Image (cartoon, helix red, strand yellow):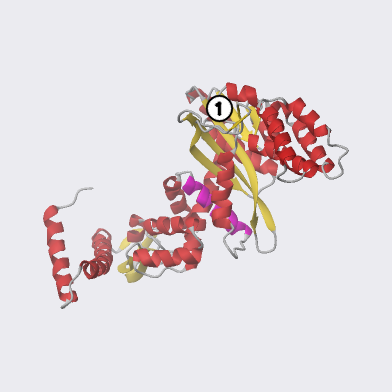
Amino acid sequence: MEFSITRLEQAAKILAEEIKEQLAEKQGINEMEQIMRELVKEAAGLGIQQAIEQGEERYARKEVGCRCGEKARFVSKREAVLWTVFGKVGYKRRYYLCAECHQGQSPLDQEYGIVPGQVTQALSSLLGVLGVEVAFEEASQLAERFLLFRVSDNTVRKQTEGYGNAQAQAEKEWIEKAEDEKSLQVRERSLEYRSGRIYASMDGVHVPLRHEWRELKTLCWYKVEKIGMSTPKKHHGQAVGEQNHLHAKNMKYYCDIAEAEQFGRLLWATGIQNNVDTYDEIVFVSDGAAWIWRLVEKYFPQAVQIVDWYHASQYLTPIAEAAFGADTSQAKEWLTRAKTDLWEGRIQEVILACRTFLRHVHARPFVEKTITYYTNNEKRMDYARFRQQGYLIGSGTIESACKQIAAARLKCSGARWTLAGVIATAKARAAWLSKTWDILKPIYLNLSTST
């Protein structure tokens, strides 16, 4: 965007003169900067007002077309208010009324995409970003600090949820297309296949509503790249539990409070949206939750399935502590051997090692739980083969997603959400973290102008 240097210099000179008058005797850069911020805000607001009203010349006529097919006649110039990043802007524009359908309109508002009394898209986006980062009350305080005018926490909430609703609308449209046979056929003819792997992970985390806690199911599609030589921890010469040379990138997060089957539709639709079926391999890395693997089998049956190493290994610690005592040398030695066997994919040996404690009163409940988990997921725990073939075997990406979306924002101290509010805020934050925020702007605008 280019500006006239001459006009900018003229405006700067006027601002400098105004600062000089305002400063009186005391002159310092801090005072200059604060006064300049106030001046720029006020001047920009007046500039927007004048720019809007100058557009009135295009509508200086007695009649304009109405949606009903008749003519709307000029009534008068009416005042309206618009909230911008420079504060409240008042302006006048021509107002027309149709005698047939009694619908009024202001062509200037329609031309400029103005919704009188509401915030502009730029301000809405800024407030929405603040709202996904911190509690609405704190976001209101930050907005005032940055913008030099007061914005209520309810306004911040409305804009944040608006972006979340825009994300929900986008997801709804994806689901419809992903379940429409004709759309899939058209898509199939234009696909470009690519080499490499695409990963996905799913998990659930509980969030506080006003009268209960509900599970927010979360999904992440991502890629994995090598970033250098691994420097793992070692046990008996074997690298156990570290894959420092693999790094997740290009994360796309999606979430909802829904039953597993409904969430499966989102899984499928986001997969299609991200063209995951064009890659050589789809790889799922998640914990052993049954609902996760049911959805994977249903929608992506050819995918490589890996149970997260960290979840699997954590089942061994309670057994060692119950059998030998926490922090004892015997517990540490047994745990090291068991984890090494697990790391090498020797699942049956680990199960046998656990079985030796079935008669131990305190260890038995943990043993039974572990054996069931390992037996049900044995094929997904062939860690030696997975590592040899270069797969990431940890689901830290989705663990991080749950922390960033739920723990960092939705579980703020004292937070108690409505169901609609928590879903919208979660979806908005997921979009921000996915770096798809700006894609939502036109969808948000359509939703806000249609309500």
Residue that appears at 15% across and 67% down: 16
Element under disc 1: helix
**In the rendered image, is residue 160 in sight?**
yes
Q: Which amino acid, mark 1?
A: Asp
Classify 100 as above or below 343. below
Residue 403 position in % (x across, y down): 57, 49
Identify the image quadrant of residue 58: bottom left
Write the residue at 20% across / 69% down: 28
Q: Residue at x 60, y 65 (%)?
A: 414
**What's the magenta bit mostly, secondary-structure-wise?**
helix
Q: Residue at x 48, y 59 (%)?
A: 131
* Label 1 environment density (alpha carbons within 10 Å; few <14, some 14–19, many ≥20): some
Q: Badge 1 is on which residue?
A: 277
Closer-to-camera residue (289/438): 289
Could you tell me if residue 315 is visible in this image?
A: no
Say if the magenta span includes residue 50: no
Please state which of residues 403 and 128 is positioned toward the viewer in this rendering.
403
Q: Which residues are magenta?
A: 419-433
Q: Position of residue 252 (x, y in %)?
A: 51, 40
Query: In the drawing, does residue 32 fall left or right of residue 364?
Result: left
